[in-house]
Image (cartoon, rainbow, N blue to C red):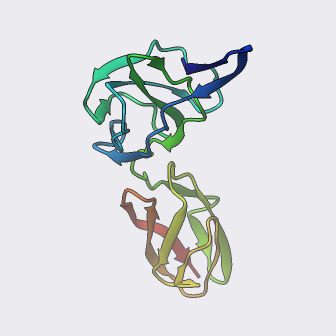
Amino acid sequence: MKKLTIIISLFGIIGIAVAQLPYPEITFTNITQTDALVTWTEVQGANGYTITWCESFVYPPLLEPFDVGTDTFFEIYNLQANYCYKVFVMPYNEEGMNDLGTGEVFCAIPYPAIASFFADDCTIKIDSYVTFTNSSIWADEYVWEFDGGVPNVTSQANPIVLYKEPGIYNVTLTAYNEIGYDKVTASGYIIVSQ
């Protein structure tokens, strides 16, 4: 709600001025992959704050605002990883409470990458190609290592590898995201014969 100031003169009401508390600046810090600490700047003239949030494409928020009193922080738990949320912090005083305003968007940290792959053929003849399919999840960067293969190392998502010499070869895939990485090695995965 906004504070209304009525301007009166000898000739009656000549105007209405609308005053509103400023919105605080909001900062998000991840506690875990799906929990976040929300902090905000203190607003001059505020007696307290309420906070609410929703998925960024849902409006208005489905949650009733939480009154956090004079605290300038709040912990949000059990957010859905890989989702983005719009968070609203609304200062209030004896005159009322701010409207929702525009809020701030926060994206929950995704789960750690999980490396996984398979090949179209694991038993081949020399001078044959193998197509590797990357089935990793929650990953956005990759490094492959192919013992005996050409190329020997690549960052392509789904590489095609040539094997020129007979042997039994390992394949390693490391998958990365902003949390870290996961590495999987398939020992003796490719068998190349004459």
Tell me: residue 2, above or below residue 89.
above
Q: Nearer the viewer, residue 161 or 56?
A: 56
The residue at 51%/67% (across/down) is 142
What's the residue at 61%, 65% (across, down)?
A: 157
Query: Residue 110: x, y in percent?
Result: 45, 45
Instruction: Find residue 103 and report its horizontal and vertical position in percent.
Output: 55, 35
47 with respect to 7 (left or right): left
Picture layout, residue 143 above or below residue 150: above
Task: In this rendered view, identify the residue nearer to me: 141 or 81.
Answer: 81
Q: Is residue 150 above or below residue 45?
A: below
Image-based side of 125 in relation to 30, left or right: right
Residue 127's spot in the image, x, y percent?
A: 67, 84
Q: 139 or 70: which is nearer to us?
A: 70
Q: Residue at x 49, y 72 (%)?
A: 143
69 sits left or right of 59 in the view: left
User: In which quarter of the view is residue 6 placed?
Assistant: top right
- Residue sitting at x 64%, y 26%: 17
Work out which quarter of the rendered image holds the N terminus and state it. Answer: top right
145 in relation to 134, above or below: below
Q: How many labels, in total? A: 0
Furthest residue to the front?
10
* Residue 140 placement (x, y as % from top left): 55, 60
Depth check: give the residue in front, 133 or 45. Answer: 45
Q: Is residue 164 left or right of residue 181?
A: right
Q: Quadrant of the C terminus?
A: bottom right
**Residue 73 lies in what quarter of the image?**
top left
